[in-house]
Image (tube, coloured by chain):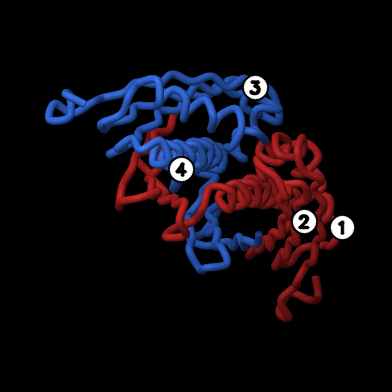
Chain colours: A red, B blue
């Protein structure tokens, strides 16, 4: 896997580009998303992708996944993450135990980003399921 | 530090947003940057930000930083990174030893993302300095 990072838009701003030419903007001065925020987004996305795929295999109808991530950093240099809490809200015609199981499988077995970050930070999670009214008879 | 991830644009697509409302698009089906690519971009950006700041303190005139990242993943689940090579090309009226020192300081002391990822992957780097012709008498 290859990516390229290049200076752009002046001081402390960079564009990262993948092999398909897709890019994201990163910044060290708050003009765009910062690198450590980006790691949290990558971690949540890596897991949300797992959860969406696992729920599909479980024949659960996932409409929407939202993950709120709250992270604590070391009060030192380097300011690595020490604790990360992920709160999943999964909407759809989904059984709560299936949703919990999907998140558990992602966090303990599949999510490559979490598996790297858990060597530095204590990771915990909560799962909430919202079944839309028109699906509440499932 | 807080971020939110939300489903958007259909299957396996997500938008990550930080507390300032800045966002990036992530995808599990190649429609946008993938989570593991994003981690590499975050790592390169975290380090490039360090290098740009350190070179400024060293009174070296950095015009441009480019980082090519080449990563190998485990042939297993989870497919964590096992090796990451970063090739820095730094352009400006910069002494080569200062550039090497700046990258070394970033990778061994400051870069929070690298410090987390180095627990999984072996990280190595090379530094090339390009002094534009009109600066070559420094």
**Residue A85 - label:** 2
Q: Quadrant of the C terminus of chain B?
A: top left
Q: Callout 4: residue from which chain?
A: B
Image location of residue A131, percent across then percent down: 75, 72
Most foreground residue, B25 or A105:
B25
Looking at marks 4 and 3 on the same chain, the residue that comes earlier in the sequence is marked by 4
In the image, is residue A62 above or below residue A130?
above
Circle 4: element type: helix
Image location of residue A84, percent across then percent down: 75, 52
Circle 2: element type: strand
The answer for how far apart the CA atoms under marks 1 and 2 are is 20 Å
Circle 3: element type: loop
> Pointers 4 and 3 in contact (CB under 8 A)?
no
Q: Residue at x 73, y 36 (%)?
A: A115
> Pointers 1 and 4 in contact (CB under 8 A)?
no
Q: Residue at x 51, y 41 (%)?
A: B46
The answer for how far apart the CA atoms under marks 1 and 4 are is 43 Å
Looking at marks 1 and 2 on the same chain, the residue that comes earlier in the sequence is marked by 2
Foreground mark, 2 or 3, reads 2
Horizontal side of B25 relative to A75 (left or right) equals left
From the image, tell me which residue sits under label 1. Answer: A97
Q: How many residues crowd mark 3 within 10 Å: few (<14), some (14–19), many (20+)?
A: few
Horizontal side of B83 relative to B44 (left or right) equals right
């Amino acid at each position: 896997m290859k990516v390229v990072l290049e200076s752009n838009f002046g001081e402390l701003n960079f564009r990262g580009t993948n092999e398909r030419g897709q890019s994201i903007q990163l910044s060290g001065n708050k003009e765009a998303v910062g690198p450590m925020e980006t790691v949290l987004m990558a971690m949540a996305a890596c897991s949300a992708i797992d959860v969406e795929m696992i729920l599909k295999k479980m024949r659960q109808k996932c409409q929407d996944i939202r993950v709120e991530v709250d992270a604590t950093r070391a009060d030192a240099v380097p300011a690595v993450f020490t604790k990360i809490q992920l709160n999943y809200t999964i909407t759809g015609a989904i059984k709560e135990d299936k949703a919990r199981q999907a998140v558990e499988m992602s966090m303990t077995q599949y999510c490559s980003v979490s598996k790297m970050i858990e060597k530095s930070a204590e990771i915990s999670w909560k799962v909430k399921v919202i079944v839309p009214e028109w699906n509440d008879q499932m």
